[in-house]
Image: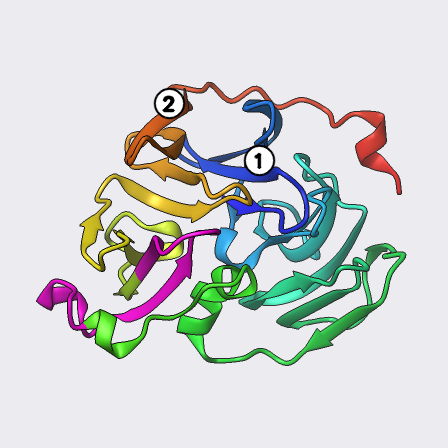
Amino acid sequence: MLPATAAPVALIMRRGPAGWWHLMKWDLLRCEVTPGAWLRGTLYPRRCAVSPDGTLLGYFALGHGKSPWDTYFAVSKTPWLTALTAWQTHGTWTGGCEFAPDNSLTISASMDKKPFHGSYPYRVTVRDLDHDWVRRDLQNELNRGWRPLPQEAAKRLPPELRQAVLIERTRRGDDHALVLAHTGTDFQRHGIEGVQVSYLRREADGAFTPLPEAVWADWDSKGRLLMATRDGLVTITDRQSGSWTRTWSQDLRDLTPAPAPSPHWAREW
């Protein structure tokens, strides 16, 4: 899940069935999900980013095409993957990317400096690959305002999580917070890019409520809890009359791949 920082939209990057990825645009005002691209290949959501207004996607992909379309970084219009510009990467040694408010783009990767396809109308900076893998795993959260969990708060967590890398994001307008515990990488277990994370909600009194159903969670600008669950739902939970209430959900299970050409507006700047 990649929420925009300056618009009420998020990009859903759903994996499955086997070998397939599906992109969908989630309108958080209307609570509508619009289908987009299907890809048979590999995407790396923790190394992708959307522009602040949610209209552009920077993504790393491992495809089945001939070089240079085998491993590459590209920019497209959400929720599509039609590359408006693309750079060849040197394998999957990639760090991530970030859009600035003016849509200038910073990419961290072992990659060519010049695009082999198209051009980007804003400034582009290519940085050397940073080998801080945990920061790479958490870069999207850190860019959205997550911060290290204070040590005093960490002492109240379950013992098995106290040695994890812990970050939190406070809910707008009150003392509730989300906590993410990064416990390592294991490609034999379920996890986005193999990253093992657990989520908890810190209540106003400082107690922690585990969220075992969450594979991804964050607050939106209204203080609602957005979540993607292990059983294939995307949900919105809000605090109403002193309790947390699920106000909306959509089931994304059992989707059948239906690749289609991108619309005309997604194929040009």
Amino acid at dot 1: Leu
Whether 91 is among the magenta residues is: no
Q: Is residue 33 left or right of residue 68?
A: left
Q: Residue at x 63, y 63 (%)?
A: 97
* Residue occupied by mark 2: 253
| Disc 1 to disc 2, C-alpha distance | 17 Å
Quadrant where the image shows the C terminus = top right
Q: Please name whichever residue, 159 or 232, is drawn nearer the observer in this view of the structure.
A: 159
According to the picture, the residue beneath numbered tag 1 turns out to be: 39
Element type at mark 2 = loop
Count the marks: how many? 2
x, y (%) of residue 172?
A: 48, 51
Which residues are drawn in magenta?
155-180
Instruction: Please state which amino acid type lies under the numbered disc 2.
Output: Arg
Foreground label between 1 and 2: 2
Q: Can you give x and y, in whole percent of width and height, for residue 128 in the image?
A: 64, 81
Q: Secondary structure at mark 1?
A: strand
Q: Is residue 185 left or right of residue 135?
A: left
Residue located at (54% from left, 80% from top): 130
Q: Residue at x 81, y 46 (%)?
A: 84
Report the front residue among 184 and 53: 53
Q: Residues within 10 Å of mark 2 (few under 14, many from 20)?
A: few
Residue 94 lies, with reference to residue 268, above or below; the image says below
* Quadrant hosting residue 242: top left
- Residue 30 locus on image (x, y percent): 60, 23
